[in-house]
Image (cartoon, rainbow, N blue to C red):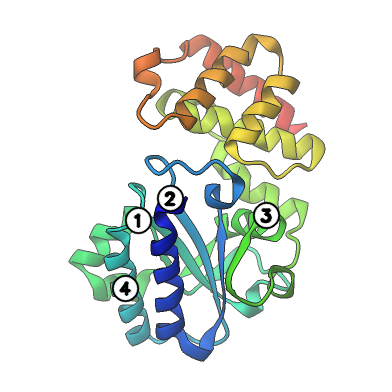
Amino acid sequence: MDEYSNVIDDFVRQNRIILGENLVGIYLHGSAVMGCFNGQKSDLDFIIVIKDEFPDATKRAYMDMVVALNKQAPEKGIELSIVRENVCSPFVYPTPFELHFSIAHLNWYQTSPGDYIEKMRGTDKDLAAHFTIIYHRGKVLYGKPVHEVFCEVSRENYFDSIWSDIEHAQTEILENPTYIILNLCRVLAWQRENLILSKSEGAQWGLTNIPEKYAGLIAGALADYEAHNANWGQHGKPDETRAKEYADYMLTQIKR
């Protein structure tokens, strides 16, 4: 993370300039606060909380700043959502957001900024998961303390939020084995023990708590996740039959 400290500092500084007195706080979440950041495989995850409306002209200046700064970010870039303080506590679900950006949307903004500014608003169920990470393990980069801004997300809303990431695991595990294998571990750890874990921590929990016949799958996914250059292709793809069996087992356990 140290190599991106200047990017984070600059991000905070420019948020304060652009948003001014409307800015409530800037909060870091994801792998950057959970001890498993990998510059080649992780992004920088931010939630920005504001007080009042966010005019389109300010959004345009904000997006220009983010796109410029994104060039200095990790390979997966910056991901952020801007939300109003009044949806954080009491928590509103699905959660309204004022603006969102990830590298997946970079081309849209660059080719049609007006269209992006007009349409990139709405509600996002993923924010329940992000708020939960912030509430339990997030870092304040600027502004009010976490527990003055965020309340705890209910189990029902949190599960509904994370379920969408795993509900198609039986097919998606073959397309994105590392993500699905590790995500299933941490979801089951939460379901059984109320643990809020990173993907790496989820894998370690899984190696202890999930049947040993799946240990090879979990260990392989963990090795791929933590490596800087290696991937499943170099180590051999996981066995399709075992991977699907694992996904079916994990989904059954989670749904219980």
**Which amino acid, mark 1?**
Ala
**Which amino acid, mark 2?**
Asp
- Indicate the position of residue 79 as horizontal and vertical percent values: 43, 58
Residue assigned mark 2 = 43
- Indicate the position of residue 193 as horizontal and vertical percent values: 81, 37
The circle drawn on residue 65 is 4
Q: Could you tell me which secondary element the residue under label 4 belongs to? A: helix
Up-down: is 159 above or below 239? below
The circle drawn on residue 73 is 1
Residue nearest the observer in this picture, 106 or 230? 230
Q: Position of 232 compared to 28: left or right?
A: left
Residue assigned mark 3 = 137
Up-down: is 135 above or below 60? above
Q: Nearer the viewer, mark 2 or mark 1?
A: 1
- Indicate the position of residue 98 as horizontal and vertical percent values: 47, 74
Distance Cα–Cα, label 4 vs label 2: 17 Å
